[in-house]
Image: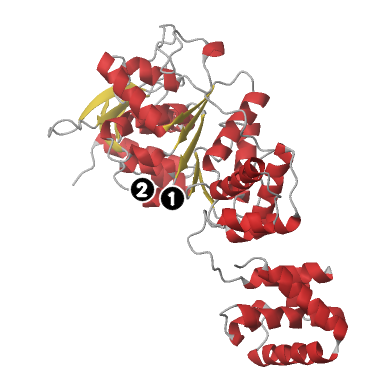
C-alpha cells in the first residue's frame, strides 16, 4: 500500500528528530504522534492530550521546526490535532486544532482556554482579590530544617528538600513525593521546605494545602460556579504543597481539576511537593494519568527512625524546650517507643507534664509508667543492636569494633560480654548471634559465653563490670 504524502513527510521528519534526541525521549514524545494531513505546507499531527502538546512546544519546538523546514520547505507550518477525552459521555474522543508557536498564553484546562491574569481571581483562602502580598502561604513557621533531625530513615527526602529550596522548580525533583507511615515527619518536612523557600525566594508565591482542604475548596467553588477562579488561583502559584494526596482517591472530579493544575504548574517550571501515606504504586482509585505524573520526579520514603535517630530527636526536642533529662531516661524512651516520631515526642511531653503536675522527679521509674500508655506490650525483647551499644558505651569503644576481626584484648572482652548477654536476653540462635558479631560461627559464641562465666567466678573486677552492664541493660525492661 502506497504511503500518503502526510505520512511520508512525517516519517522523514522523524528520521531527523531521531538523530537529535535521546532514544527514551523519542519513544515517549514522538512515537505516539500520528500524522493526519498535509495541505499547503501545513502538516497536521495528532497528539494524545493538551499536556502532550504543551510539552512538545516547550521542549522540542526547535527540532520540530528545523525538521519541517528541511522536509517540507521554508514556509512549512505545524498544527496539532489534540485528543480531548470526553469523560461525561460515551461518545468517541474528538479533536481541536492548535497552531505551533514558541509562546502561548497559559492554559487552565484541556480545551486550551487561556488564563486572563488581569481578571480578579478569588482566593480560596478567603482573602479577596489576587495580590501576591495577600496570599497566605498556610505554612507553620514552627516546622523547619533546624528541628527536622536527619537520620538514615530520611536522608534522601531531606537532601532533596534542601536542593528544592535552593532552586524551586529547577531541579529533577519535580514533583517531590514524600511518602511514609503515620507520624514519621512528612508534614513537618513539607512545611520546612516551604518555609525555607519563602526565606530564600521572597518573591515566590508558596501555598501549603491539605488534600481534604483542597477537596472542600473545589466543592465550594463548583457550588458557587467559580471553578475557573479556583483553578486560576492554584495555577498562579510558584510552589504548591499538597499534604496527604491519598485522600484524592475516588474523587474523580477533584482528580481531574488537580490534573489540570499539576500540568500547568509543571509545564511552567513551578515546584510541586506532595505527601502521601504510601508509595505512588500502591495508590488505588486514582486516575492513571495523575499517578504517572506523581512518578515523574522523585519519590522519597520516610522510614522508621533507628535508635540513634530517636535519641537525637528527643535531645533536639529537649534543647528547643530548654529541659534536661538523664541519659538513661532518654535512651529508655528511645528504646521502647520505636513506632513513629509523633508517639516518641508525645511520650516525652507526657513525661514532662506528669512530672510537673505531680511534682515527681523525672527519673526512670516515672518514664516506665509513662511508656505503659504508649506500648501495647510492656515486656519487650531487647535487641542485639542495643546490647552491643550499651556494652561498647561502657568500655568506650565503637560498636563496629566488636564486629571486626581485631584480637585486641579489650575488644575481645567487650565482644564476649555482648555475646553472653545476647544469648541470655534474646531469642536469637547461636548462628544468628555469630552473624551479628561480624559473621562468626556458633562455636565462637559458645566459647565466649563459657569464658564470661569462668571470669565472673574468678575475676572480681570483671564480675563488677558484668553486673553494672546487666543493670544498664535491664533498666530497659519491666
Please state which of residues 194 and 90 is positioned toward the viewer in this rendering.
Answer: 194
Q: Is residue 164 left or right of residue 462?
A: left
Q: Which of the 4 image quadrants contains residue 333?
A: bottom right
Q: Secondary structure at mark 1?
A: loop
Q: Which mark is residue 283?
A: 2
Please state which of residues 223 and 95 is positioned toward the viewer in this rendering.
Answer: 223
Q: CA distance from mark 1 to mark 2?
A: 7 Å
The residue under label 1 is 279
Q: Is residue 408 left or right of residue 471?
A: right
Mark 2 and mark 1 in contact (Cβ < 8 Å)?
A: yes
Q: Is residue 352 left or right of residue 99?
A: right
Image height of 416 relative to 396, above or below: below
The x and y percentages for residue 132 are 54, 13
Residue 159 appears in the picture as rendered:
no
Number of marks? 2
Image height of 319 relative to 364, above or below: above
Residue at the (54%, 49%) spot, across then down: 343
Mark 1 residue crowding within 10 angstroms, few (<14) / some (14–19) / many (20+) = some
Image height of 229 relative to 299, above or below: above
Residue 356 appears in the picture as rendered:
yes
Please state which of residues 209 and 70 is positioned toward the viewer in this rendering.
Answer: 209
Residue at the (77%, 81%) spot, across then down: 405
Mark 2 residue crowding within 10 angstroms, few (<14) / some (14–19) / many (20+) = some
The x and y percentages for residue 80 are 31, 27
The x and y percentages for residue 429 are 57, 84
Q: Quadrant of the C terminus?
A: bottom right
Q: Is residue 389 left or right of residue 75?
A: right
Indicate the colouring scheme: secondary structure
The x and y percentages for residue 325 are 73, 50
Q: Secondary structure at mark 2?
A: loop
Residue at the (68%, 91%) spot, across then down: 446
Residue at the (67%, 66%) spot, across then down: 475
Amino acid at each position: 500500500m502506497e504511503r500518503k504524502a502526510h505520512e511520508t513527510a512525517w516519517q522523514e521528519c522523524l528520521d531527523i528528530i531521531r538523530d537529535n534526541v535521546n532514544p527514551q525521549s523519542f519513544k515517549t514524545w514522538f512515537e505516539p504522534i500520528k500524522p493526519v494531513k498535509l495541505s499547503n505546507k501545513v502538516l497536521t499531527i495528532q497528539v494524545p492530550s493538551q499536556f502532550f502538546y504543551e510539552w512538545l512546544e516547550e521542549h522540542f519546538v526547535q527540532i520540530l521546526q528545523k525538521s519541517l523546514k528541511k522536509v517540507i520547505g521554508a514556509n512549512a507550518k505545524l498544527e496539532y490535532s489534540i485528543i480531548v477525552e470526553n469523560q461525561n459521555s460515551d461518545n468517541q474522543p474528538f479533536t481541536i486544532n492548535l497552531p505551533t508557536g514558541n509562546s502561548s498564553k497559559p492554559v487552565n484546562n484541556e480545551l486550551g482556554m487561556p488564563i486572563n491574569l488581569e481578571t480578579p481571581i478569588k482566593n480560596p483562602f478567603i482573602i479577596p482579590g489576587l495580590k501576591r502580598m495577600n496570599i497566605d502561604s498556610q505554612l507553620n513557621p514552627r516546622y523547619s530544617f533546624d528541628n527536622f533531625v536527619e537520620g538514615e530513615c530520611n536522608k534522601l527526602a531531606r537532601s532533596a528538600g534542601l536542593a528544592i529550596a535552593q532552586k524551586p522548580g529547577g531541579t529533577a525533583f519535580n514533583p517531590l513525593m514524600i511518602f511514609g507511615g503515620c507520624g514519621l515527619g512528612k508534614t513537618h518536612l513539607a512545611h520546612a521546605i516551604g518555609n525555607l523557600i519563602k526565606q530564600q525566594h521572597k518573591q515566590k508565591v508558596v501555598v501549603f494545602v491539605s488534600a481534604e482542604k483542597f477537596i472542600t475548596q473545589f466543592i465550594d467553588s463548583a457550588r458557587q460556579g467559580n471553578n475557573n477562579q479556583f483553578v486560576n488561583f492554584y495555577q498562579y502559584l510558584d510552589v504548591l504543597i499538597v499534604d496527604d494526596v491519598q485522600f484524592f482517591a475516588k474523587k474523580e472530579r477533584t482528580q481531574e481539576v488537580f490534573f489540570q493544575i499539576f500540568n500547568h504548574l509543571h509545564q511552567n517550571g513551578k515546584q510541586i511537593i506532595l505527601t502521601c501515606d504510601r508509595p505512588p504504586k500502591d495508590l488505588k482509585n486514582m486516575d492513571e494519568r495523575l499517578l504517572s505524573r506523581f512518578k515523574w520526579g522523585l519519590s522519597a520514603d520516610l522510614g522508621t527512625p533507628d535508635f540513634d535517630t530517636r535519641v537525637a530527636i528527643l535531645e533536639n526536642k529537649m534543647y528547643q524546650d530548654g529541659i534536661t533529662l538523664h541519659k538513661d531516661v532518654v535512651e529508655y524512651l528511645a528504646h521502647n517507643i520505636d513506632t513513629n516520631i509523633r508517639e516518641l515526642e508525645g511520650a516525652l511531653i507526657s513525661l514532662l507534664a506528669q512530672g510537673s503536675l505531680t511534682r515527681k522527679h523525672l527519673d526512670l521509674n516515672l518514664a516506665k509508667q509513662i511508656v505503659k500508655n504508649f506500648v501495647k506490650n510492656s515486656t519487650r525483647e531487647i535487641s542485639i543492636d542495643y546490647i552491643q551499644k550499651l556494652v561498647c558505651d561502657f568500655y568506650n569503644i565503637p560498636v563496629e569494633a566488636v564486629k571486626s576481626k581485631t584480637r585486641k584484648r579489650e575488644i575481645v572482652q567487650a565482644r564476649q560480654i555482648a555475646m553472653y548477654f545476647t544469648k541470655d536476653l534474646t531469642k536469637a540462635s547461636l548462628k544468628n548471634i555469630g552473624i551479628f558479631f561480624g559473621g562468626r560461627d556458633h562455636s565462637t559464641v559458645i566459647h565466649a559465653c563459657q569464658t564470661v562465666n569462668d571470669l565472673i567466678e574468678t575475676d572480681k573486677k570483671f564480675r563488677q563490670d558484668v553486673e553494672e552492664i546487666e543493670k544498664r541493660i535491664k533498666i530497659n525492661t519491666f
